[in-house]
Image: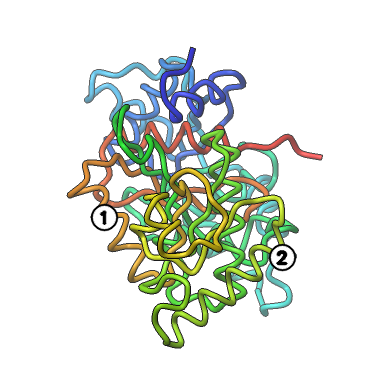
Amino acid sequence: MSHSPFDRILDRARTTPRRIVLPEASDDRILQAAVRALDEGLARPVLLGEPETIRNDLARLELSPDGLELHAPDDAGLIERFTLRLLELGSHRGMTRERAAQSIASPVTYGCLMVREGLADGCVAGAITATAEVVRSALRTIERDADAPVVSSCFLMLFEPGHPFGEAFVAADCALIIDPDAEQLAAIASAAGDSAERLLELVPSVAMLSFSTAQSAKHAGVTKVREATALARAARPDRRIVGEVQLDAAIVPELLARKAPQEPAGPPCNVLVFPTLDAGNIGYKLMQRFGGARAIGPILQGLVQPVNDLSRGCSTQDVVDMIAVTAAQVRERR
């Protein structure tokens, strides 16, 4: 039996181990995580790079290559296939054959194309690659979900059992969209609620965060959050969405009832939607560093096939966790 929301992610990953491509096989953390993910039954890792080099690096780390797939990105037929695909996908942006060939030389872009072409189920990168490059590679290769107007990101924030406000929260957007407008903020709220539901198996209670509760302040930023709340409610009338609301009222039901009695009552909100990237990035790091939360992300939302980013300061355990999340995100292809 699962003991925490994140255990449910691990269980789902183990139920159907997926092929997760890791384009940064030159990094020791990636190699160590690949072996651990395989040993724990979380995925079937695909290490992208020159196989002999990877074997030598594994031997140096006293790790076995048994069970790992080593994929050399040098098959002429596959390179041609990927080039044509990238040409097709980028035709409206003036993509040329030369630029397509140069793009495929990037391991992250190559890994994303493996996902696009059904040669892998998901991709995890970012240990040695900037977030901007990971996201660019994903956006130009992976189809956007028809129900997602924007691609955004979220973090899973995990607390110890017995935490007064709950063991698991979803925080968004903390890594991607700098200053979302009302429509984008509503889309982020919808996607973050879906992430809470699909990954953590939570019943989403969404808080549209602001420095104001129930128009206690007048400001363009408050107006944006109020408009986003209305749009999010119209899009998801089945979901509890509270806003605009301050953080304390969002997680303390008694305070919400006092400050905004007209808001739908319920438990502490478990999906925290921040009004800007400034607020989101600072907010999740406060929860992590001061509150002791375990932060897993950034997880990309709004793509048909999963591609996820790592922090360049990630640990081996962070990579294992993200492999599990990526495996759990995989949806059966129609």
Colour basis: rainbow
Q: Residue at x 70, y 57 (%)?
A: 236
Direction from residue 141 to residue 237 in the image, left or right: right
Q: Which of the two discs, 2 and 1, labels the residue nearer the N terminus?
A: 2
Q: Residue at x 59, y 77 (%)?
A: 227
Where does the image place residue 250, in percent across and percent down from the top left? 42, 56
Work out whether 212 lies above or below 77.
below
In terms of secondary structure, where does tag 2 sit?
helix
Q: Residue at x 45, y 34 (%)?
A: 323
Where does the image place residue 186, in percent across and percent down from the top left? 60, 67
Direction from residue 117 to residue 182 in the image, left or right: left
Q: Residue at x 31, y 28 (%)?
A: 162
Direction from residue 159 to residue 136 in the image, left or right: right
Q: Which residue is mark 1?
A: 285
Work out whether 90 lies above or below 109.
below
Amino acid marked by disc 1:
Lys
Q: Which residue is mark 2?
A: 234
